[in-house]
Amino acid sequence: MKKLTRNIDYFLILSVIMLFSMGLLGIYSASRPTGEEGLIFKQLVWFATGIGLVILIQFISLRYLEVMSNVIYGFLVLLLILIFFFGSVKMGAKRWFNLGIFQFQPSEIGKFIMICALASYYSNGKIFWNDKRYLITGLAITLLPAILVFKQPDLGTSLVYIFLFVSIIFAAGVPYYYLLNMFAILLFVIAKGVGIQFFVTSLIIYALILYKFSKNYIKAAIIWFVCFFTGIGSSLIWSRLKPYQKMRLLTFLDPEKFSREGGWQVVQSKVAVSNGNLTGEGFLNGSQVQLRFLPEGHTDFIFSVISEEFGLIGIIILLGLFSLFIYRMIKITIETHNKFLYLVSSGITALFIFQISLNIGIAIGIMPVTGLTLPFLSYGGSAMLVNMIMVGVIISINREKKVI
């Protein structure tokens, strides 16, 4: 028992418990108008199960995580294939296995599995970044499950997988110009979908950047043409997006203009956030929430619920808890000397930062709606269990970092 309690980060645990408590308030308030108050009891069960998993992880050596990473990656790919045949349909998407008493979403646990698989690959010996094989292989490991998730369809989670790849190679020491070029390619894909003017403007700006900072103009020209043809070819990607996915990516630019086509959620969310003022409208008194103007208040837009009912003070407390949570994970990551565990911890930290930033950005209308939940606050069993598993791994890394 003394071994299990060694180097436990109690501030990390406290921040998770406090965040979950705020989430319960938001879930209860958002579900009350629809008569689904019982959701908080289900969420309590998921959290209690998550605590059990955190404790269980402390009995397992993290060496097995590295050894088994390729096996669980293969199992993930198998599940993502099987879901097309045996998955249950919900809101037009086939993302879940119906296991009777609960539904399991493989793409959620896939986030953690992707971190482990990529960390295992990039910690296996010295990486020579001039050899493009290391980038191509890592990208292949990422794209296989990302494409399967995208076909469910689940655009948001597939983009998370791409983000995890970028985060892991960044932590593994990839040269910055590789990241810049990868970001540029993604930008041109989005720019082509937004409009030809945005696309042309992006090309001009990127050409100037390459001209200013490149030492090899021939290589710079090749990179520019790759970005150009990738943007042109992205029409194929956009043509395969569902209409609602296209609107999610575009309405954040002007949600009021496209309120009928898909911007309604964002408009109501921004109204709820602005209603909060300093102290909020009070618990169970939020007009947008209680009058059911705000959709998905217990999941995607729980930040808006808390903002409306608890105001700026509530937001400051919430962001303070998230800041403490992220700070403790960054501290643990920096102090970790085992390369595999360092990459795993970096990936987990990056994932939480990404999901927190994106969810809050969606709520205040500066990011496109992707359906990603707010960790520890939003209702959902699969997401809660995966988040708790990752917290358990971080706690275990902190305990074992001086031993491994």
Image (cartoon, rainbow, N blue to C red):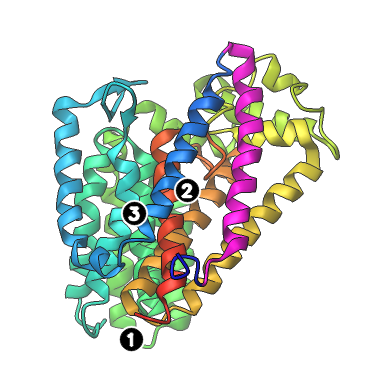
User: What range of the chain is rendered magenta?
Assistant: 7-35
| Magenta span dominant secondary structure | helix
In terms of secondary structure, where does tag 3 sit? helix
**Going 38% across and 88% down the picture, which residue do you hit?**
215
- Mark nearer the viewer, 3 or 1: 3
Q: Residue at x 75, y 23 (%)?
A: 286
User: Mark on residue 112?
Assistant: 3
How far is mark 2 from mark 1, CA to CA?
A: 28 Å
Residue at the extreme top: 35
Mark 2 / mark 1, whichever is N-terminal: 2
Can residue 287 be seen here? The reply is: yes
Q: Which residue is mark 2?
A: 197
From the viewer's perspective, tell me whether residue 282 is left or right of residue 103.
Answer: right
Q: Amino acid at mark 1?
A: Asn
| Depth check, front residue: 177 or 48 | 48
Furthest residue in direction front, as rendered: 1
